Image: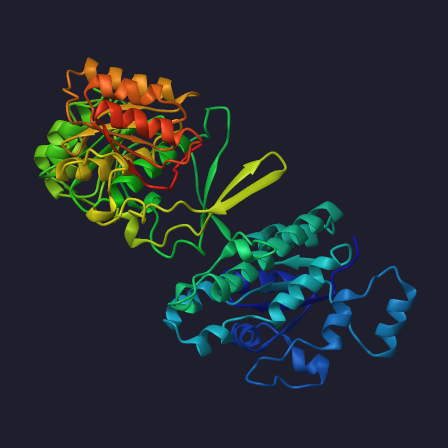
Amino acid sequence: MKNVNNALLSVYDKRGLEAFAKGLVEQNINIISTGGTANILEQKGIKTTKVEEITNFPEILDGRVKTLNHKIHGGILAKRDNKEHLKVLTNLEIPMIDLVVVNLYPFEDIRKQSVGDENKIIEGIDIGGSTLIRAAAKNFRDVIVVVDPEDYASILDQIRQKNSLLSFRKELAKKAFQHTCYYDAAISDYFFCDEEKVSNTQSHDGLESESILIHLRKVQRLKYGENPHQRANVYVNLCENKNSTILESQVQGNEISFNNLLDIETAFQCVSAVKEKCCTIVKHNNPCGAAIGNNSLDAFQKAKECDQISFFGGVVAFNHEIDEELAKLLTSFFLEVVIATNITAGAKTLFRKKKNLKVFSHPVLSQNKPALLDIRKLNELYLVQESDGFGLEKSIDLCDNELTSVTSKVPSAKQIRDARFAWHIAKFVKSNAIVLCKDLKTIGIGAGQTSRIDATRIAIKKALDNGFDLKDAVVASDAFFPFKDNIEEIATSGASCIIQPGGSIKDEEVVATAQKLGVSMIMTKMRHFRH
């Protein structure tokens, strides 16, 4: 190992600084430091050489320029086994810097505390520190770079043992570049993703960029992934979510799993977009029941009627408060997760009796910024699309006079309300998806089938098996009907209104069949495949 003679310390995070610096001094290492760090070390009685004593140049421009100097960066970047490099250092009287300890201004905290004051935010961008880290990390064969106070003990240990392995320095360099990469992503987030920087007339369009910088921070390790043998973590993209996450809103229960989160997202997105009091029950990432009720209790009772087998072990979401009466009912069943916008103190007390039940209290997702992009990994490829969103988008938020039938039979006002609700739920059901709805509750759902006729038959069978009368029920399809057989099955069941996107080459035949069988049909002209 090459000896460590000079160490440059310039840190915002002062944790462990004093003990670390004293450890360096004990090893006869000269400490070079900048303003704030130097002042603290001197107050602790630790001798330090200020950067300006090396550069013979003062800090200028309110501290914007202090380490950006050839006598600093030359000492970091020179290759120790290159005679020409060493000759340059000698001729210019540049000391070699063997250890660089730097961490950066907390840009995210500064941004938050600045409350939109752009001048303060811009001053929170660290230039010199980032440059020092990158220079030291680039020259990791000769220089030790440290960005995390948690590494101080192991650094001192290796210095004392004179055993700073190349593999160790390379790991530190990797950590350093991750540090600066994340930092740059936080700054990029401010310029490209902050809603305050987007005008009222122009929204941010991530798909217009030739490259996409994903700004992720690990927030939690999960119990396991999709299956117990798979490890999994949760990361948050700060560009998309400035508010608290669902993870932070867990009231009680076991450790959350990968599959739990998938089901929670589907269930809670589904209810969050509904203005009325709504309950959605999800199993294996598919709604198995959803309803609007007079209150949360009423909504739950109606939702579970859709599939009184599948709702066991499910995720139940509410866009309204859970009170004691509802909590008492919920705890009488086996459920994996319950999530609502608010939970009364009495309800929380009742939930504690089922300590394994995972309970969350979280604001409706419409209060958070929705994802800009939907990103999925496919082997070596990344598929990126605009998010389908979770609001009642224009295809469902049409005025009543725009929800008109393409057949001569006109849906009733009640059927139009049911059609809106069924169409919304279908959006969260895996394709091929068919949703039967009556009285603002689902009565049959056919999910994830390879043919639409099978999805239609399954939805009808579930409704009939549960004793529902399909007369005047509404059927929603997430995509067009490819053949008239679906319409014939629906008409035979007693349902008399269909809402679907249209767009099939057999639309004319499908509409003619509906016309012949006395079924009203609404076309939304927007598909909602969910793979």
- The residue located at (19%, 22%) in the rendering is 333
Q: Does residue 468 sit above or below 163 in this rendering?
A: above
**Which quadrant of the figure contains the C terminus?**
top left
> Quarter-wise, where is residue 280 in the image?
top left
Q: Percent from the top left, x then y, of residue 326?
A: 11, 33
Q: Does residue 459 sit above or below 270 in this rendering?
A: above
- The residue located at (33%, 52%) in the rendering is 244
In the depicted view, which residue is nearer to us: 394 or 243? 394
Residue 433 visible in the snapshot: no
Q: Percent from the top left, x then y, of residue 526?
A: 38, 42
Q: Which residue lies furthest to the right in this view?
A: 83
Residue 53 visible in the snapshot: yes
Q: Does residue 485 sit above or below 323 in this rendering?
A: above
In this rendering, would 309 be left or right of 205?
Answer: left
Q: Percent from the top left, x then y, of residue 399?
A: 22, 50
In the depicted view, which residue is nearer to us: 181 or 420? 420
Q: Percent from the top left, x then y, of residue 397?
A: 26, 48
> Quarter-wise, where is residue 88 in the image?
bottom right
Q: Which residue lies furthest to the top in this view?
A: 465
- The residue located at (79%, 75%) in the rendering is 94
Q: How many marks?
A: 0
- The residue located at (41%, 26%) in the rendering is 482
Color theme of the render: rainbow
In this rendering, would 472 be left or right of 258?
Answer: left
